[in-house]
Amino acid sequence: MEKANESSVMGFVLLGFSDHPCLEAVLFVFVLFFYLLTLVGNFTIIIISYLGPPLQTPMYFFLSNLSLLDLCFTTSLAPQTLVNLRGPEKTITYGGCVVQLCISLALGSTECILLAVTALDRYVAVCKPLHYVVIMNPRLCQQLATISWLSGLANSLIHATFTLQSPFCGNHRLDHFICEVPALLKLACVDTTTNELVLFVVSALFLLLPPASILISYGFITQAVLRIRSVEARHKAFSTCSSHLTVAIIFYGTIIYMYLQPSSSYAQDQGKFISLFYTMVTPTLNPVIYTLRNKDVKESVKKLLSGKLCSLWM
């Protein structure tokens, strides 16, 4: 019992990329750059969605929720990663590990649902434009966002419970740079087959059903867009939808790779770099892709900046 509780007392050593010491300085700059980009980009999306009248629509309501998610998600991981990459001490307390695991799981799971909700919003906008305002009313949008956040919290509690109940028997050297489910299960000194099965089923619900609903929505959207006679309107619809689809493919692709494969085939080094990508790079994609491909966003940014400059000049 004493050995089983040792990890909860001592915490974990996050080995991270210590087996590649020459790479740590490069990764520090990499993480810092994308963290700052995430902060600036997502804060910008939230501000213009709130202050820009043309962007006060259901689509940008959900997009600002995604930006808030990405801000919190990266902030729950990046500071600890930067500290471990720069200093000789690469430790995290047991409580810190639990908090990091729960928050990152909750936010990541919420994003899984929100991306599907955003696809539903695009479906209604393109396929039922005359009824869009009535269907996607503020009350429904609030309810869909609330369901997404609560679903993410429930998934986090299930994953954290089944992962952390396994005894680590004094093994507190975590071969990862963050507290993540696949890496933590590797530390267990008991058979985790049941845990992995339960977690696989729960993960499948979040990582297969939402992408399936997105594909179905975009199937109907594609049919509707192809019936549009105006080339300009068709291009605008495809541009907006392709931005969302690009974000969804990258997000689900990396997460599915991490959570829907047997632990026996989990390559630790490869898993760390995949995790680095979806925890640090993916949160920058929403503002970058939507800003570069969406005229409304670019116009709102220009108006806000010009308004600020004019007020400073006056």
Image: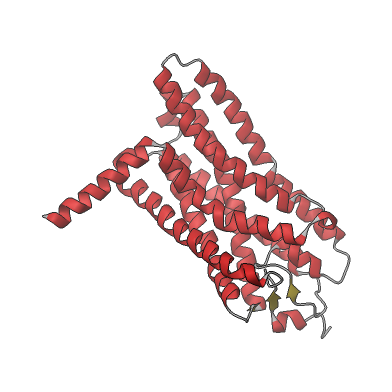
Q: Is residue 230 visible?
A: yes
State the image quarter where residue 136 is shown.
top left
Q: Residue 254: x percent and y percent?
A: 66, 49
Q: Residue 112: x percent and y percent?
A: 60, 47
Judging from the image, the colouring scheme is: secondary structure
The residue shown at (22%, 53%) is 308
Q: Say which quadrant the N terminus sits in.
A: bottom right
The residue shown at (35%, 37%) is 296
The residue shown at (54%, 59%) is 73
| Along the line of sight, the residue nearer the viewer: 253 or 155 | 253
| Along the line of sight, the residue nearer the viewer: 146 or 23 | 23
Q: Is residue 77 visible?
A: no
Q: Residue furthest left?
A: 314
The residue shown at (73%, 57%) is 270
Q: Say which quadrant the C terminus sits in.
A: bottom left
State the image quarter where residue 268 is shown.
bottom right
Q: How many marks?
A: 0
Q: Residue furthest right?
A: 191
Q: Residue furthest bottom?
A: 2
| Along the line of sight, the residue nearer the viewer: 306 or 21 | 21
Q: Residue 119: x percent and y percent?
A: 54, 36
Q: Residue 290: x percent and y percent?
A: 44, 41
Figure check: 178 above or below 123: below
47 displayed left or right of 111: left
224 displayed left or right of 155: left
| Along the line of sight, the residue nearer the viewer: 36 or 163 | 36
Figure check: 266 above or below 127: below
State the image quarter where residue 54 is shown.
top left
